[in-house]
């Protein structure tokens, strides 16, 4: 009796596990975040409300890197730079990103018409008249030793008298401070450009360039020129900071430090300065702070001077006396370099008008 073979039923093959891959770089995922590029795995499309909530949480969260970085930047001089070079970097914003964000915010505020007018009227035209008279008084003290100084002093007195008469006339006509500031800027421009109204006997290219510049200034009342300077200052800072870092390297040659250490120290300190100026600029928009702006300006300037000295002490770790000597040297180098860069920025801005 033949036996019928029993068919063998094979067990179904288990399904091949589907390994999730990063949608950005294609790396297999072992969790919610990609181990290669760090992107979060979010295959579904989010709503607008989700994005708004995520943005609000990232800005307002108590442990946000932004607020921690700004807090250290404002009240702990030199600490951010030390933290960076000691390897504690994840908890703070990167130095160059921080600098770009703060400087961009400041120059956006500085470029608004209201702020420009406020800056123009910050130093009153009465102060300008007083400055002319003070310069004349200083020259008059030397007129015994140099009689020519008396002529120069008399010219300054005459200029101060004309400026005061012009301001009194504007006040009598009911002009506001912004109009007076604009008229003052225009009078400076006219006085400067009068020298270039006549044809140049030598026919030099620089004289012709100044004539063309004065024509543009006359057509725009100098507003485009000032706006161009403000627009170009952030670009100039990319030349200014590396030059100043080179001076810092020459001063701090022992113990040996890398050039980038000085550069990042300056980046953090300039970010603080821009942040302080931005705060002052925003305070000008607060009606209640109007009567105290002079006092607040003085406090902030004193704090900035102390802040930079303290930052040098914290980061470089040298004695107070040695730090003060280098602080003074850096201050003089800063002033000379900033004047040079500002002049070059103004020339470039004039040529680009």
Image: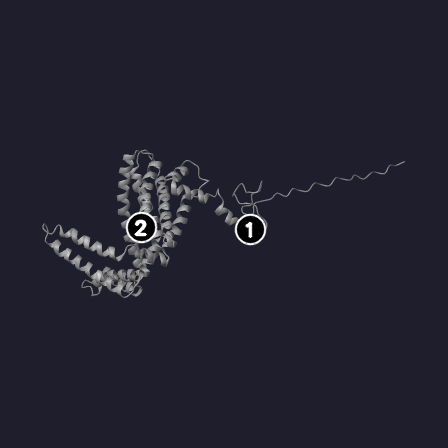
Residue 288 in sight from this viewpoint: yes
Q: Name the residue rendered at 41%, 46% in the picture.
A: 98
Of mark 2 and mark 1, the one earlier in the sequence is 1
Residue toward you, 238 or 133: 133
Give whichever of 336, 166 is nearer the camera: 166
Placement of the N terminus among the 4 image quadrants? top right
Q: Looking at the image, is mark 2 or mark 1 nearer the viewer?
A: 2
Would residue 337 be found to the left or right of residue 6 on screen?
Answer: left
Up the image or down, 181 lies above or below 280; here it is below
Residue 319's spot in the image, x, y percent? 30, 33
Residue for point 16% across, 51% down? 138
Q: Is residue 205 left or right of residue 283?
A: left
The location of residue 259, given as percent across then percent down, is 34, 40
Q: Which residue is mark 1?
A: 50
- Examine the rendered structure and indicate whether residue 275 appears above or below residue 201: above
Q: Is residue 33 above or below residue 319?
A: below
- Left or right? Give the position of 104 relative to 345: right
Which mark is drawn over residue 294?
A: 2
Number of residues whose C-alpha sits closer than 10 Å to that of mark 1, classed few (under 14), some (14–19) or many (20 or more)? few
Q: Is residue 204 visible?
A: no
Q: Residue 333 occupies which quadrant of the picture?
A: top left
Where is residue 29 drawn, in percent x and y?
A: 58, 42
**Which image quarter holds the C terminus?**
bottom left
3D distance between C-alphas at marks 2 and 1: 45 Å
Q: For the residue labelled by badge 2, is the local secondary structure a helix, a strand or a loop?
A: helix
Residue at the far right: name it: 1
């Amino acid at each position: 009796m033949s036996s019928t073979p029993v068919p063998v039923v094979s067990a179904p093959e288990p399904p091949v596990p589907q390994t999730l891959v990063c949608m950005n770089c294609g790396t297999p995922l072992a969790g919610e975040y990609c181990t290669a590029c760090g992107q979060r795995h979010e295959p579904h499309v989010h709503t607008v409300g989700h994005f708004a909530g995520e943005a609000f949480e990232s800005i307002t969260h108590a442990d946000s890197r932004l607020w921690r970085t700004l807090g250290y930047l404002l009240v702990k001089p030199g600490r951010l730079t030390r933290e960076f070079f000691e390897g504690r970097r994840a908890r703070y914003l990167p130095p160059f990103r921080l600098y770009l964000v703060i400087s961009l915010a400041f120059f956006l505020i500085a470029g608004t018409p209201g702020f420009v007018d406020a800056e123009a009227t910050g130093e009153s035209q009465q102060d300008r008249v007083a400055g002319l008279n003070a310069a004349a008084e200083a020259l008059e003290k030397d007129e015994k030793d140099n009689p020519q100084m008396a002529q120069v002093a008399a010219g300054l007195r005459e200029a101060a008298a004309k400026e005061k008469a012009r301001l009194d006339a504007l006040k009598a006509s009911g002009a506001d401070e912004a109009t007076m500031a604009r008229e003052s800027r225009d009078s400076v421009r006219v006085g400067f450009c009068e020298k270039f109204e006549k044809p140049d006997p030598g026919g030099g290219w620089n004289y012709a360039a100044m004539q063309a510049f004065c024509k543009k200034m006359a057509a725009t009342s100098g507003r485009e020129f000032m706006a161009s300077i403000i627009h170009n200052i952030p670009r100039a800072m990319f030349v200014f900071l590396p030059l100043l870092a080179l001076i810092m390297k020459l001063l701090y040659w022992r113990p040996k430090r890398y050039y980038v250490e000085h550069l990042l120290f300056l980046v953090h300190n300039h970010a603080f300065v821009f942040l302080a100026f931005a705060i002052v600029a925003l305070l000008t928009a607060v009606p209640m702070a109007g009567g105290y702006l002079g006092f607040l300006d003085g406090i902030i300037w004193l704090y900035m001077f102390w802040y930079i000295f303290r930052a040098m002490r914290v980061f470089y770790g040298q004695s107070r006396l040695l730090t003060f000597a280098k602080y003074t040297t850096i201050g003089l180098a800063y002033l000379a370099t900033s004047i040079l860069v500002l002049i070059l920025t103004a020339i470039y801005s004039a040529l680009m008008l």
